Amino acid sequence: MLNVVDVQLLCSGGVDSTVCAALLHKALREDQVIAVHIDNGFMRKDESQKVEESLGKLGLKLKSKISQGVTFLEGIFWWLVLTMSNW
């Protein structure tokens, strides 16, 4: 007998993760699919909201929407500073 556990899915909003989310939603119970979206600061304007809306149309709710734009941008800034200082 198959022991089914919860599945965590990182949803970028692209075709691959959206199709995967739709298939998981059909195959598993709603409470077994844990959909997460991370706004990394490089998303287009309102794109994170559109990701949430498109998943909602499939009947899937995001369990967590994480906004990490500042963290990503700070990391890139310091990487550039360190890279340029080594030249």
Image: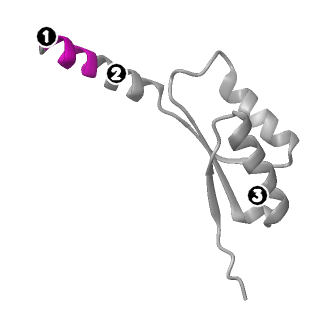
The secondary element bearing badge 3 is classed as helix
Q: Please state if 62 lies on the left or on the right of 75 as rendered.
A: right
Q: Position of residue 67 (x, y in %)?
A: 53, 32
* Most common SS among magenta residues: helix
Q: Which residues are magenta?
A: 78-85
Please name the residue shown 69% across and 43% down the image.
Answer: 17
Please name the residue shown 74% across and 49% down the image.
Answer: 21
Residue 24 circle label? 3
The secondary element bearing badge 1 is classed as loop
Q: Quadrant of residue 52?
A: top right
Which residue was labeled with disc 1?
A: 87
Q: Measured along the vertical axis of the image, is residue 70 above or below residue 56?
A: above
Residue 76 circle label? 2
- Dot 3 amino acid type: Leu
Please name the residue shown 73% across and 89% down the image.
Answer: 1
Circle 2 packing at 10 Å, graded few (<14), some (14-19), many (20+), is few
Nearer-the-camera pick, 22 or 49: 22
Q: Is 84 contained in the magenta span?
A: yes
